Image (cartoon, coloured by chain):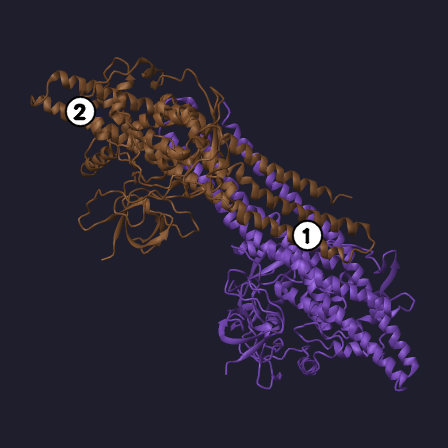
Chain colours: A brown, B purple
Amino acid sequence: MATQVQALYDFTGEPGTTEMSITCGEVLTLLNTEIGEGWWEGKKSNGETGLFPAAYVRKLTPEESIQTKAAPPAPRYDQAADDWGEQHYSAGDNNYQRGVSHEDGWDDDWEDDTYSEIGPAQQQNKTSQYNQQSSIVIPGMPINDYNQHIDDTSSNYSSSVGTVRKNKFAPSSKISGESYLLATLNVEVPDSEKVYIIQDEDGYIWSPITQPYIVTVASPKKESKFKGIKSFIAYQLTPSFNNIQVSRRYKHFDWLHERLQEKFTLIPIPPLPDKQISGRYDEQLIERRRVQLQEFVDWMCKHPVLSRSEVWQHFLTCTDEKRWKAGKRQAEKDNLLGLNYCVSLVVPEKALLQSQVDHITEQCHTFINSVDTAIKSVSSMCIVQTKRFQGPYKSDCQKIGEAFYSLGNALSLDEGTIVSTSKLTSAIKMTGGVYIDIGRMYDEQPKYDWEPLGDKFHLYKGIAASFPDVLANHKGAVQKKRECERLTAENKMEVAQLNEVLRRTDVISYALLAEINHFKSERTVDIKATMQKFLKQQINFYKKIVDKLETTLRYYDD
Amino acid sequence: MATQVQALYDFTGEPGTTEMSITCGEVLTLLNTEIGEGWWEGKKSNGETGLFPAAYVRKLTPEESIQTKAAPPAPRYDQAADDWGEQHYSAGDNNYQRGVSHEDGWDDDWEDDTYSEIGPAQQQNKTSQYNQQSSIVIPGMPINDYNQHIDDTSSNYSSSVGTVRKNKFAPSSKISGESYLLATLNVEVPDSEKVYIIQDEDGYIWSPITQPYIVTVASPKKESKFKGIKSFIAYQLTPSFNNIQVSRRYKHFDWLHERLQEKFTLIPIPPLPDKQISGRYDEQLIERRRVQLQEFVDWMCKHPVLSRSEVWQHFLTCTDEKRWKAGKRQAEKDNLLGLNYCVSLVVPEKALLQSQVDHITEQCHTFINSVDTAIKSVSSMCIVQTKRFQGPYKSDCQKIGEAFYSLGNALSLDEGTIVSTSKLTSAIKMTGGVYIDIGRMYDEQPKYDWEPLGDKFHLYKGIAASFPDVLANHKGAVQKKRECERLTAENKMEVAQLNEVLRRTDVISYALLAEINHFKSERTVDIKATMQKFLKQQINFYKKIVDKLETTLRYYDD
């Protein structure tokens, strides 16, 4: 029997390539695992065949059980000039958990030559010996813990609280979530780390940012190490609060993103650029990634909770190897993950009405479903329009231009000495040139309108895609609360403990309500600005066409 | 062995249909003659298969001889609501000459109900009995003469003087041309019918029109006869010199066109609309034909020779059945066809230098070759652009509009009571509406720019396509002249006769030079105006887009 795989996530194949879109939960027949670069080939039930990232599916065994065996060697991070498009899973591996073994290129790489990658890029050529040994056990890497959590999670996947989030590391949010909710977690959070939720006229909101800052992501540089043998793309980040540039590779962003997703299960984490960006040139591709990283960074900076988080601050500011490593290990050992993070929250002293909360979350659920579809369609429209502008629209204009130019040329063969004829033929040739120019404008234009719009909607696509998990995490907590209420009714739980559970469930609800409001107010401002910018660029484009045509028209005047 | 056919003319198939383009001289394998409506199916040597007009090819017999048997019954003109698209050749007929038998719908039809078709359309419902008999011998129809000419032409096709013109009636211009040139034709032309060629600063020109007029072709009406059983499209023509409207069907234009082509072998006759006009609706199609007929009529009116010709004047003015018939017969019996027409010309009393004439004709030949290609590419570009505007450009805009509209709609699900949100969502919906509107504009636009441009270049395509025949007719005369010079050198021709041949050859050359100049000055004025009009429409279009986008942008303002 042919091996079957099940999609773990949605994947949108690049149109016009051999890639195939797959939908989470979809079962496919596996055709070929030897494609390379992390791609597999499969066949859908409707007969469609194509490629998809091996990482996006899991093999179905007859028993459909997930065996948690040791992860095989993952592809080394530093084998490619850029980290993008690499898959952290090996083809033919039944275990879809990310390879976290000590062979992971990340840490390996780190030991040797960390500094040159994270500081301002001035030490990149310092000599260092590349450690070829690949089986060093890295201190601070809680392999056993992770494996345990994975075991735990995989067998209780659908029923547990706060584990819907598809973390590659399969975080232990189920346990940590429950330990907060059931009041078994009692950690004192220092005042400086407390996060307040307050009420304003629109409802409950995160206490606004007191010291706003921005971070600019500069055009990336190609850097190299190991005497130039290895090269990679590093993005230069400069926070406005200290003006100290740091250099970050995609893998650093990726690591950060995983930490944020583990920690903030009630806050959608903005997406990183994904593999499916269209672009004809490497430089274009790198620039698009930069813009999408800027979108990620902007969202982080504007978020009252995320912008203050320790791991983010560490990521933004650390330029020292030792401190980086220390911060990294600390982040990976963070206990306040998932719902446990809620111990940091200070909420209004008012019990929430469950029916009101239910109403808001249901409305949010409906809204997210609907807006997710709309965002996806805007997003794919941007890709299609970019291709249209750079493909047929451009070439149509060029064909028009060429036709007019040849006409002018042909007519000039017989213009003789008549002035009006030679004026006409040069005007026609000019017209041809203008249409060829307009063709070039079509080629350039997406950079100013469709691509930025697409980048913005890439962000919203990611946010909207995370929201159902956020809602499910909250729902899990509410269900747990109801269970406790039942237990208390059956005298199996003490009233005091139930009251603490109720209070903590409210904290979780407050967090969700604050986040829903944050998303709403952010997007209102942000989408408005985006649409204005987009329309201005479109207007500008068509105005330039008008200008060009008016100029050429004047050449026909006597 | 499969029957093979050889293309007699170039035919450009409509892209995206089953039609296939064929090139003059190309040999195809005949697959199917049962397609109907004058179409055959064939296969090219490269394997391409498709349809082409049966009339555009001849069957190759093993002996490759053309058998001039009696023409089989041609399709009746009045069997269709409109005459367009009908082929005047029968499938399976070896004789590619037009069927001119008495079964031709034209005369048949004429006998019964002529008046209602040619006068102002006020008598169209008058009762008349339809004569079903189809074998009446029509007086004035010189069948025998024509057959004789056809025989004559088909055996001497490539070598004779003045017969390169692809007249459907295969005019006897070879004979008539020679009889003029060899000075055996001596007809006195009344002064009123004489046409002068004069010299101005740009060279030899037709004496300009003294009484210019225009003729408007009004939107056609569907008329009917035989108590409504038959209906047809008739175009209303109103000349400015008398303001009397006449009603003409396409078949009348077609008849006129054939007379003009027979008579004026040194003047390219503007083309009639052809079958290959794209258009989605019948009404659009009819309107395009009207515009192309207007182009034909305009060119006729502006031509110093054509605008005065008797058959044209008859066509423009006759509203009376009897006079129409008389004029029609007279035109068909016209002796001054082809080069013989030159007896009407009065040219400067100055012998032309053959080398100068050769230079000009060679230049014209080069020019026409080159401009013909350019005109064809502009012309097909107009068709392509029309389809682009009405197809993908339109639907792209609509998709943009729909995506924005759905976004606005989805966002409005969660706008709550925040004013800025509801303002934003309605602005986004508005933006969606504007793009859908712009889509509609793309659909409408070709009517204002690409289609008129295409109609103009349809005219020039026809003129350019006729020019090689005109040049060949002239060249034939020059060759005949050289032959006469040789004969005289060999004492086989008298000097006096040679001198007359030389004089008459000069008249022919004067006519050609005047026509070359006419074409040049006409196109200079005409193409300039056309380009200006086109550019203005394009500017207007993009300005409207700018306006619409600016309006929608203002909705985002606070």
Q: Residue furthest left?
A: A491
Identity, as a three-letter code, of the amino acid under mark 1: Tyr
Measure the C-alpha gap from mark 2 to mark 1.
Answer: 76 Å
Identified at 40% across, 33% down, the residue is: A252
Give the residue at mark 1: A405
- Give percent across and percent down for residue B84: 57, 64
Q: Is residue A516 visible?
A: yes
Which quadrant would the C terminus of chain A be assigned to in this image? top right
Give the residue at mark 2: A481
SS assignment at label 2: helix
Which subunit holds the residue at mark 2? A
SS assignment at label 1: helix
Q: Nearer the viewer, residue A204 or B395?
A: A204
Q: Classify 10 Å Cα crowding around label 1: few (below 14), some (14-19), many (20 and above).
A: many
Q: Classify 10 Å Cα crowding around label 2: few (below 14), some (14-19), many (20 and above).
A: many
Are dots 2 and 1 in contact, CB under 8 Å?
Answer: no
